[in-house]
Image: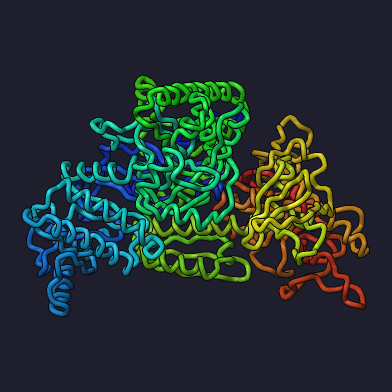
């Protein structure tokens, strides 16, 4: 299929867009993967899938056209994604499907016959073998066979109960046992995605609504009690082909699991408790909703309680109601946590939920209203609860209207503070997906009105901020990072219709970035990887060298899950993985592996960032009375970032003990209330000149684009033209951390009389996905490998553009654009290199002082090799393209 590309904006505009049409099959694959994360990691731009509509058609494995699967509901609870689908189970794409079987596994009618017709006689043969070997399958039990030609790997044959009206309890118990057994079999066979129909609701005549309630409630209870033991399962699809059954499942999920992750048509108009659009705000991945009800009845992952500083849950209306439903175990756990100590206002204590419908309870200690300062305590409570939610990786949380009862807070002030804190958290936590509910007591009409009014005020303010940002940043290349993205559901009806018409561009991946060059690189990658059906694909990425046991195990799981083969190739200079199998499986496995490598790549970069910073500045203890060592690189970076941001304090983890570092008092207090004096040891004041401008974000660098009208651009342009290269973009790299390490290294080499005052200006080509990493961490062997390590196992540079373009042609042959770094390199005491060198040899008789680099020839040197990344400082990143006239390129 050809690409349909629309470029919106341009080099003079702040944000550029490219929209790439994709097929229905590719769209189905991409929906299951975080393609945006992969594209961001590789190219630094966003990639969002658009245009999936209910009317889309898909093709079964046998080639029959049918209605596209329709997702009615989706919610993630503790990492488990539960969804409701109207779809044909014989074409539904999961790892395993559940068959509504009979005791003899005679697949002669209903769903069982449909699965056999689509999957083939292997299902019949294996079923017969199971019965001969083990006997009949008892009601409430389940067995597993292979799936034959179905688009899954396994079938779980579950025997549900026949409905017995005179003994309803036994029938319900047996159905729950059948669902539990299905989940156990899924764990035994390491199933990640599972499809379950409305078991027993067909020819076994089980009442549909009761059946749906039991299935959903059993799943919810099973994973609440046994999540850690059965955490292999990622997704459960409740799949039925008729609208009535699918609707019953949807409503059961809504009642038992709560609101879905996205407000789609899954929120039915006849459910009175549904929030209206005017009472919903969505910012980034967070959704804030108002709801009337009792806090103790909520079915979110966490509910928030307000309690006294003594931890007595019998005090206060909210606390009493929660204790009554949770049971006395809740008070017992609170006493075990607190002992005899009181908790200061603003603190939050986490406990289990026991008999409540949630997983945990966050108990907040507020204070009586005396003056406006007390709003700070309320802000601290909301902020802490949301941070805990992020740490605990929950997906939904319910708050009561804290302080509006006996504590005497003004209701309008509470509404304003709570809404402001949630919005502030959402802006800072862009990628954290969370539903936040403010649960208001129905009889308290004044509180309801106060929250509704503040909700509307907040939405008006947010839209004003967006319009201001659009006006202010429309000509700025960082505009896309400044603007708040609003939900479709915050628009009024007219705005939604207008948005629908403007965005009706079919199935597309939309790429958004700062410039056309970045988008072109991402587009080229999508074109050669995702839009071509292949039986094999080779992934070239030298981070494969750093895959550990954990990652190798994940590769084995990918191989088993998708039924593909993986071949790993490692040499002195490159590493790649080849994926082989059916094109559908190859695509999925390829994306899984790319995502895994992005994680490894980021871990590698973060580790180097921490080490680079620690070599310049070290936070340490002023005394060592308690045998305490200095902060490790991770804690050191957290403290340093907080210091540069001029925060008053910061919390860090030191060998599993929490420390709060106070900058003004220059001390640290740990969770055992031990107090330590601390100091900041600066080996090189890298932050001088950056403290006022730096915003504390990571990485510690800027790329400043140089305009064509500048003299330096004209100088570089002429130099590159001589070598047949056209400059598209010239950027100056500003990294105080890299510069500080470079200057320290320069001083060290001077002390050893190894270096002259000057530096060499050298060049290196780097693949597109590693350019930002060089700016963060400096030059690394992983980012740019030569075709052959002729002069040692170090980092290779070229002395001029001509020799650079003659080298490494094989490694970069598929690059659409060329990325060249110009660097200052400390390389003035060379030694003629050989392949076996891992460090330069010594030049003094004592063997202590080493040469600072190796070269291809002592005279007329073209290639330089350094063995310490701090010897090279990236100065410019030049994005260019080749001209046809030069045959050596």
Which residue is farthest bottom?
133
Seen at 55% across and 68% down, the residue is: 548
How is this picture coloured?
A: rainbow
Locate the N terminus and report the quarter of the image it occupies: top left
The foreground one among 281 and 863 is 281
Q: Position of residue 262 (x, y in %)?
A: 37, 38
Q: Position of residue 377 (x, y in %)?
A: 59, 36
The foreground one among 702 and 2 is 702
Seen at 18% across and 73% down, the residue is: 126
Residue 523 at least partly seen: no
Seen at 41% across and 27% down, the residue is: 490
Side of 746 where 441 appears, left or right: left
Quadrant location of residue 500?
Answer: top left
Q: Is residue 442 above or below residue 144?
A: above
Q: Is residue 471 above or below residue 176?
A: above
Q: Position of residue 319 (x, y in %)?
A: 43, 42
Q: Is residue 888 above or below residue 505?
A: below
Quadrant location of residue 73?
Answer: top left
Residue 786 at least partly seen: yes
Side of 737 where 395 appears, left or right: left
Quadrant location of residue 734?
Answer: top right
């Amino acid at each position: 299929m050809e690409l349909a590309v629309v470029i919106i904006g341009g080099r003079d505009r702040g944000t550029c867009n490219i929209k790439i049409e994709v097929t229905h099959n590719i769209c189905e694959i991409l929906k299951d993967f975080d393609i945006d994360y992969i594209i961001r990691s590789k190219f630094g731009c966003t990639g969002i899938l658009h245009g999936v509509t209910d009317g889309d058609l898909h093709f079964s494995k046998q080639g029959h056209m049918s209605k596209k699967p329709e997702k009615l509901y989706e919610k993630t609870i503790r990492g488990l994604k539960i969804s409701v689908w109207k779809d044909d189970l014989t074409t539904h794409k999961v790892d395993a499907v559940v068959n509504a079987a009979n005791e003899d596994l005679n697949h002669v009618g209903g769903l069982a016959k449909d699965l056999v017709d689509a999957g083939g006689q292997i299902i019949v043969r294996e079923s017969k073998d199971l019965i001969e070997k083990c006997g009949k399958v008892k009601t409430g039990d389940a067995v597993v066979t292979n799936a034959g030609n179905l688009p899954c790997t396994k079938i779980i044959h579950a025997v549900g109960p026949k409905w017995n009206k005179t003994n309803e309890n036994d029938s319900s118990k047996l159905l729950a046992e059948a669902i539990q057994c299905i989940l156990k079999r899924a764990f035994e066979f390491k199933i990640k995605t599972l499809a379950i129909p409305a078991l027993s609701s067909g020819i076994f005549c089980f009442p549909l609504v009761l059946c749906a309630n039991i299935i959903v409630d059993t799943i919810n209870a099973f994973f609440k009690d046994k999540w850690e033991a059965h955490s292999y399962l990622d997704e459960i699809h409740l799949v039925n082909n008729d609208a009535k059954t699918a609707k019953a499942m949807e409503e059961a999920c809504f009642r038992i699991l709560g609101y879905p992750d996205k407000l789609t048509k899954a929120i039915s108009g006849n459910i009175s408790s549904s929030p209206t659009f005017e009472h919903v705000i969505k910012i980034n991945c967070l959704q804030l909703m108002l709801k009337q009800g009792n806090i103790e009845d909520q079915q979110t992952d966490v509910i928030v309680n307000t309690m006294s500083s003594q931890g007595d849950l019998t005090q206060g209306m909210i606390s009493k109601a929660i204790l009554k439903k949770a049971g006395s175990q809740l008070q017992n756990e609170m006493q075990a946590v607190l002992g005899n100590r009181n908790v200061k206002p603003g603190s939050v204590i986490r406990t289990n939920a026991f008999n409540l419908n949630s997983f945990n309870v966050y108990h907040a200690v507020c204070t009586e209203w005396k003056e406006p300062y007390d709003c700070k305590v309320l802000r601290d409570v909301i902020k802490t609860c949301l941070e805990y939610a992020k740490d605990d990786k929950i997906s939904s949380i319910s708050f009561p209207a804290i302080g509006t009862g006996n504590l005497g807070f003004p209701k309008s002030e509470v509404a304003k503070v709570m809404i402001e804190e949630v919005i502030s958290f959402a802006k800072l936590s862009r990628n954290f997906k969370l539903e936040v509910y403010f649960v208001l007591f129905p009889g308290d009409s004044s509180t309801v009105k106060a929250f509704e009014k503040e909700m509307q005020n907040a939405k008006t303010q947010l839209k004003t901020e967006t319009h201001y940002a659009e006006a202010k940043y429309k000509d700025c290349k960082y505009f896309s990072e400044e603007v708040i993205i609003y939900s479709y559901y915050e628009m009024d009806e007219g705005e939604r219709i207008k948005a629908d018409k403007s965005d009706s561009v079919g199935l597309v991946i939309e790429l958004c970035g700062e410039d056309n060059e970045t988008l072109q690189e991402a587009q080229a990658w999508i074109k050669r990887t995702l839009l071509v059906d292949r039986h094999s694909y080779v992934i070239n990425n030298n981070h494969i060298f750093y895959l550990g046991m954990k990652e190798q195990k994940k590769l084995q799981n990918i191989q088993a899950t998708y039924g593909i083969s993986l071949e790993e190739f490692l040499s002195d200079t490159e590493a790649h993985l080849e994926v082989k199998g059916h094109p559908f499986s190859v695509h999925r496995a390829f994306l899984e592996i790319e995502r895994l490598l992005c994680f490894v790549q980021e871990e590698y970069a973060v580790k180097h960032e921490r080490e680079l910073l620690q070599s310049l500045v070290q936070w340490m203890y002023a005394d060592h009375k308690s045998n305490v060592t200095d902060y490790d690189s991770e804690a050191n970076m957290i403290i340093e970032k907080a210091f540069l941001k001029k925060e008053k304090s910061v919390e860090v983890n030191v060998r599993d003990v929490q420390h709060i570092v106070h900058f003004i008092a220059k001390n640290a207090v740990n969770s055992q209330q031990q107090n330590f004096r601390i100091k900041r040891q600066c080996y090189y004041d890298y932050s001088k000149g950056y403290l006022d401008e730096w915003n504390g974000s990571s990485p510690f660098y800027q790329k400043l684009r140089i305009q064509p009208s500048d003299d330096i651009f004209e100088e570089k342009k002429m130099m590159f033209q001589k070598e047949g290269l056209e400059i598209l973009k010239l950027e100056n790299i500003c990294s105080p951390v890299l510069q500080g390490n470079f200057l320290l290294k320069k001083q060290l080499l001077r002390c050893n009389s190894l270096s002259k005052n000057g530096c060499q200006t050298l060049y290196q080509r780097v693949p597109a996905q590693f350019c930002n990493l060089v700016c963060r961490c400096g030059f690394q062997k992983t980012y740019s490998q030569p075709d052959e390590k002729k002069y040692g196992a170090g980092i290779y540079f070229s002395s001029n553009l001509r020799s650079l373009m003659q080298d490494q042609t094989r490694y970069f042959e598929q690059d659409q654009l060329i990325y060249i770094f110009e660097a200052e390199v400390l390389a003035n005491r060379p030694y003629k290199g050989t392949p076996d060198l891992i460090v330069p040899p010594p030049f003094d008789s004592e063997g202590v002082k080493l040469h600072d680099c190796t070269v291809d020839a002592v005279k007329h040197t073209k290639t330089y090799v350094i063995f310490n990344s701090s010897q090279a400082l990236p100065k410019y990143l030049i994005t260019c393209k080749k001209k046809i006239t030069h045959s050596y390129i």
